[in-house]
Amino acid sequence: MREEAQLVATLQATSVKERNRFGGIFRDHVVDTRQYLDHVRESTAGTQGRPVKLFTNHFRVTSRPQQVTYKYNIDYMPDIEDGKVRTELLLQHKALIGKCHIFDGSSLLLPQKLLSPKMELVSLLKKQVVKVTIEFTSELTPTSPDCLRYYNILFRRILKMMELEQVGRNYYNKREATEFSDHNLVIWPGYVTSILEYETSITLCADVNHKLVRMQTAYDLISALCDGFPAKQDLQEQVSKQLVGSIVSTVFNNKTYRVDDINWEETPRTTFKTSDGAEITFVEYYKTRYDQVVTELNQPLLISKGKWKKSQRDTPQEPVLLVPQLCHLTGLTDDLRRNYRVMRDLALHMRLDPEKRQHELQKLMNAIQTNKEVQQELQLWDLKFDASFLSFSGRILKEVRIFQGRRVFDSHPQFADWSKETRSGPLLNVKSLDHWLILYPTGNYRAASFFLQSLRRVTPTMGISMREAKILEVSDTVQSYTTALENHVSSKTQMVVCVLSSEKKDLYDSIKQYLCVSCPIPSQCVIARTLDKLQTLMTIATKLAQQMNCKMGGALWKVDTGLQNTMFIGIDCFHDIVHRRKSIAGFVSSINQELTQWFSQCLFQESGQELVNGLKACLEAALKLWCKHNLFLPQAIIVYRDGVGDGQLQALLDHEVPQIESSLKSVYPKDSGVKLTFIVVKKRINTRFFVESEGRLRNPLPGTVIDVEVTKRQWYDFFIVSQSVKDGTVTPTHYNVIHDTVRFTPDRIQCLTYRLCHMYYNLPAGEQTMRFVSCNSPFEVY
Amino acid sequence: MASGHAPQRPLGDAKPTPRSLEPGGTGLSGCRLGRTAGAPAAQVWAPQCNSMDNCEVPSKKVIEFKPPVYEQRYYFVKNLVNRHGLRKIADLGFGDATLLWMLKYHRCVQYLVGVDVAARPFEWGGGRLSPGVGGYIVPRELDLTITLYRGSAVQKDSRLCGFDLITCIELIEHLDSEDLAKFPEVVFGYFSPGMVVISTPNSEFNPLFPASTFRDPDHRFEWNRTQFQTWALDVAKLYNYSVEFTGVGDPPAGAEHVGYCTQIGVFQKNIAKATESSISEPEEHVPEEHIYEVVYTTSYPSLQQSKYFRLTLSSESVKAIGLMKSRFLRGLRKREGDRVVPLGSCTPQFGLTEAQRAEIDQSPKPYSVGEKFYVPLERLIIYPKVNHLVAGSMEKLRTILAEGLRLNGDQSAVQVELVDYQTQRLFDEHLISPVLES
């Protein structure tokens, strides 16, 4: 499940264009957060643990320009939006600027000075005069971070030269596509690269990436639905449900659009006014311009309100009308995601183990080294890369001690797994199941009774006493479930278990809404199918019992953080891609010393803003609750902040951290000396680590910490590998301590963070770091 | 650059020209980039110079063409290509490759070559000419190769021999007298394509423009109709071509006597039709001579390539099967031995003509066995898109599908899962009809 979520995340990342991602990384990389942390002025590296030789998917830049380079600003009059056109117009003056140049769309980097600091040139765009102004802005020293930005642009040009095609920010090799004929899907392999400066050197980080392409047009989808829903009303509703919010690409010109609405009034025979004022039908337009024949004349049209940019969210945009037959669907749908077979097939293909990953990356590097044109281009700038993975020493932390009841055991050093141990003894803090309900839909009695039987078998060893549940059969509708709940839930009810016939989002949502809002009772939903497999039934029953116990306020186990009177806070942010407007932030905080009880809250906020504005209220409520449980305020607060977009580091420093500090000030008495540590967590990163054993690259063991070479000089940061994966390559998590008045030593913060990774109860096997962030909060990520 | 179709300058002359006075564009009258395929007509209108500060206010009235003349020239070529179904086309002086880009969409076109003295590798972006994502998702029917060369129209290169059409749009007026003298021998004598299209400004039109000089400072001459036609007829006679004259950019009302803004000569090789179809191969007596430098080349995925054919065929089949499957599951079914067969015909009601539906109704029905769903190939092949792809050949359908999908034991039907990510929804929403026990 975790791996699937990861897979989904990768696919999403590749399907939604993130335009400013690159610029964002650069903005973050120049933020010096370490300058304020004088306790780590000497070193941000720890010493504990067993040293281990590691490899990473970074290639050291062995040579780069050593002279000053010159930066020029380029302006267009009239202004030109399209980056390609801007390049084209500038390069009409190639004789002037020379062969050796890097242009990012608005500024130009040259190895030599131009004759005059400001030049006005005239270019022609389709017979129209465009004035291009080249103006000198600054000299860049070879070490300037700005230089790196240009090297990255150069590198992208190189990938293009190697016949890799750009989709969004990444480059794909379409000739090596893999077909999934049964699913009508194709996957293209590709690369994601970045050249950045780290602790002691500049490296090229390269990772393998995949692009999912669906061989299906919007019209195919509509016609399938037409066939299924003869009633017009139903049809329109279904089509909207499936298409609105999705990204389509028009194959003839390779543009992508987001579908915002469906226009049922118009058809491809509708005429529209071109910019010259001529009236033309869509059919004629596509025929004359692209030789595309629209065969279905009765299809509706798709409406796209244009690209969504954070900066432009208030400016109204001219909607674009699209013909479904010419629009291909992209990305994963819920239907696809829910299908086990599809996801398994995709995962098998996309999950590369360390050996395969290295092989693919080595292929890229070899191609770079042997391509004549690429080498010529690189030589112009004297850029050279190492041909093999960067290697250095990491450390493996000691296994984490788990406390469960009177028993103590260590997590398995190989797999970070302790599920076996947890099953064989009583939990830390047990809640008995006295009054509880089980709802199951007609036809699923078998699943429900299997579940009950196996619960009866696993609960005694866990120390959970369980009375008979009230068992209710319902029909498979939202109405039926809610009626049953209304009739049978009482103030004594401790837990409601709902068996669902399948993964139906609306039913799940309605149940959760009823039991969270209307009548707050802990609940557990389980899909009948998962209870059908006898061989896994005991494991599943154990996990469900653990979850139920947690939800009822019990606790499974604890880990020793080594800290007293410390509150842990997890914050995560999500964006609603469909409605474009809202951002959701989740906030959880520990309210007892054992870290077994948590306070959670959701925050909604307008627009694509990442920063949590309602933080103050949350924090105050959390402190109040802590105080109620402990009778005093915590002495230190440690925030793990996830869901931070690239380029927002400065904003965190400028707004979020001060906001927390000022909230603390208002709650605590003066000179209370309350400490705050703020750690930025990043899970979606392209850096991977490997160890070599028996001549093969393998995943590093859980507990591997990296705080040299690929960390940054101006950050107090480190990586932890906290999980073990059966297939594929493990993804490390990056932690960046940006504020720390607790004054943690590297060893202590690394150790603490690793221990906290063992907190989540859903999957003891190395749930990928910090999932306590979302635990207990009403929404799960996936 | 120099003119609407960019600069074909003799070698060594690569400096950009600052400004065009060519009337085709809207450079002096605003900055709209839009184009349409509306009826070409010139209007005289008073200039409104509002969107550009740096443009001179012309003293005379400006002529605006709709669509712009450069675009009319491109559409002229496009229509010609379409009308004659031309396969192999070269554009001398391709400039920003707009014409090549417009031509790449034609189904009939299989070889596109551009030659330009100022051709630059990479940077101007093969982007528009590359197949892009779409080219892979919806492959063309026929192969297409696009190659761009750096070279001049007065250099011989054997790779330009044997084309169906060579276009020289607004090219010859950039040639100095020496190059102009060499040009016919290279293009007509050596390249010797089936057709040649040459366009050049008609100087008789110039008095209608504000400026009284050449339309572009890089122009070495601008001919009137007599000059152009005399030259063209001489060339045609010498190299055994016939030539017809036409043009684009209609003169405004009252000035019809000046003729088109751009004059065009369409040259056709005088040879028997039989040899015309075989001219694609370079004639044997032409020795290999490679002077041009390749700056870009790409080949498009097409249905002629087995990989993309298989992909497209299985994609169309899976779509058709999907529609059948959903009908099958929703309709009444009964058990017959180990098979479950539909009572209805499972014919989609959407996107098919009545005749096609009737034919499908008659064909063997799909069925299921356990978790698998089977569609007889005899039925699948009736679906118009599938049928078109395999040209009605059952053997082809069977062989190709067997590579990408699974067939049943006797290879008479395609086998897919009954429950997939699309039909899952039907199960979830209880839209599946029960199977009648017989």
Image: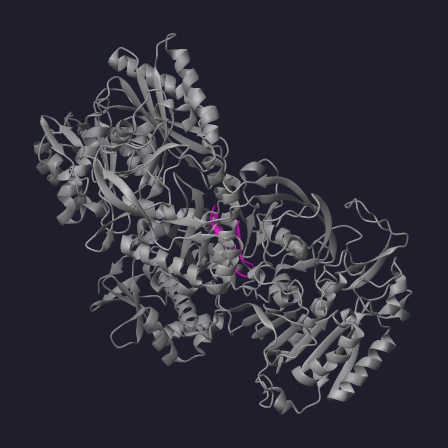
User: In which quadrant will I find the C terminus of chain A?
Assistant: top left
The quarter of the picture where residue A411 lies is top left
Residue span colored magenta: A244-259
Magenta highlight on residue A245: yes
Q: Is residue A12 left or right of residue A110?
A: left
- Tell me if residue A273 comes above or below residue B111 in the rendering: above
Judge from the rendering whether residue A472 lies leftward or rightward of residue A454; answer left or right: right
**Image location of residue A27, percent across then percent down:** 49, 36
Residue A22 position, x and y percent, is 48, 43
Residues B191 and B87: in front is: B191
On the image, the x and y values in percent for residue A433 come to: 15, 28
Please say which color scheme the image uses: one colour
Residue B21, x across and y down, in percent: 81, 58
Q: Is residue B383 visible in this depiction of the protein?
A: no
Q: On the rendered structure, is A378 left or right of B263?
A: left
Left or right of residue A567, residue A594 in this image: left
